[in-house]
Every structure is written in C-alpha cells, then in structure tokens.
Amino acid sequence: MTTSDAHANGTRGAARLAAVLVLIVILALAAGFIAKYVFHYYLNYNAVAFDNFWPRRGTLLVHITAGSVALLVGPWQFWTGLFGDRIPRTGGRDVSISWA
C-alpha cells in the first residue's frame, strides 16, 4: 500500500464518520420533533387536545403516523445509499407509502 492509498482510505473513513454523525443528528432531531409535537395527540385523545381537528381526528392521526414513519425511515435510505448497501424493495415502498 502506498502513502497515497493510505491517505485516500483515511479521507474516505473521515467522510464516512461525518456522514454517520450527520445521520445520527438528523435522527435525533426527528425523534425530538416526534416526542415534542406528535406524542401528545396519542396520549391525550380528547377534543381539547385536538381542538379544531377533533371532527377530522381519524385522518389527522393517519397523517401524523405516516409522517412519523417517513421521518424515522427516510434517513435509513440515505444511510444505505452512502455506504453501498442494497435497499430492500420494501424500503422505498415503506417511505413512499408513508409520504402519500
């Protein structure tokens, strides 16, 4: 192995570490958002918590659940793309369905 090969491997390793850290931060922000803004709809299932949305609470809960899935599964697709792993056929379908 030459010096330039070792340097290229070190640079690739640093880029990979940076990508992992960015994805961890994104997942942490998504989880924080869900904890702060989403869980109260599940924990307080009443007209006061839903306010104007009480008549449409069913569709709102479906929307919130699908959005939560998209927030938490979406970074996984970037992870597999960055590191060359194959995404199973259901991976993209799961996120696409949650976006709909």
Image: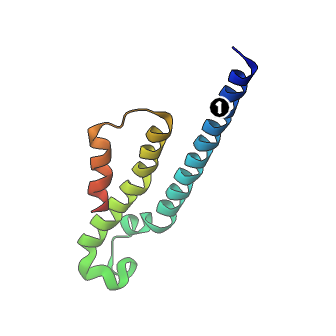
Q: Residue at x 68, y 22 (%)?
A: 5
Image: 57 above or below 6: below
For the C terminus, the image quarter is bottom left
Location of mark 1 (residue): 13
Q: Nearer the viewer, residue 38 or 75?
A: 75
What is the residue that sits farthest to the right in this orientation? Answer: 3
At x 67%, y 29%, the residue is: 8
Which is nearer the eye, 18 or 48?
A: 18
Most extreme residue toward the top is 1
Name the spot of residue 44 as percent of width and height, x first: 38, 70
* Residue 71: x %, y % from top left: 43, 56
Question: Which residue is nearer to you in this view: 36 or 83?
Answer: 83
Q: Quadrant of residue 65?
A: bottom left
Percent x, y for residue 77?
Answer: 41, 45
Name the residue type under label 1.
Gly
Q: Is residue 48 left or right of residue 83?
A: left
Residue drawn where x is 35% and y is 37% of the image: 87
Q: Position of residue 82 (x, y in %)?
A: 50, 40
* Quarter occupied by residue 40: bottom left
Q: Is residue 5 left or right of residue 72?
A: right
- In the image, residue 66 sits, relative to residue 6, either above or below, namely below
Q: Secondary structure at mark 1?
A: helix
Q: Quadrant of residue 1?
A: top right
Q: Looking at this view, is 32 or 87 the one in front?
A: 87
The answer to whether residue 31 is left or right of residue 4 is left
Count the marks.
1
Looking at the picture, the colour scheme in use is rainbow
Q: Is residue 43 above or below residue 16?
A: below
Tell me if mark 1 has few (under 14), some (14-19) or many (20+) residues whose alpha carbon lies within 10 angstroms of its own: few
Determine whether 38 is above or below 97 in the image. Answer: below
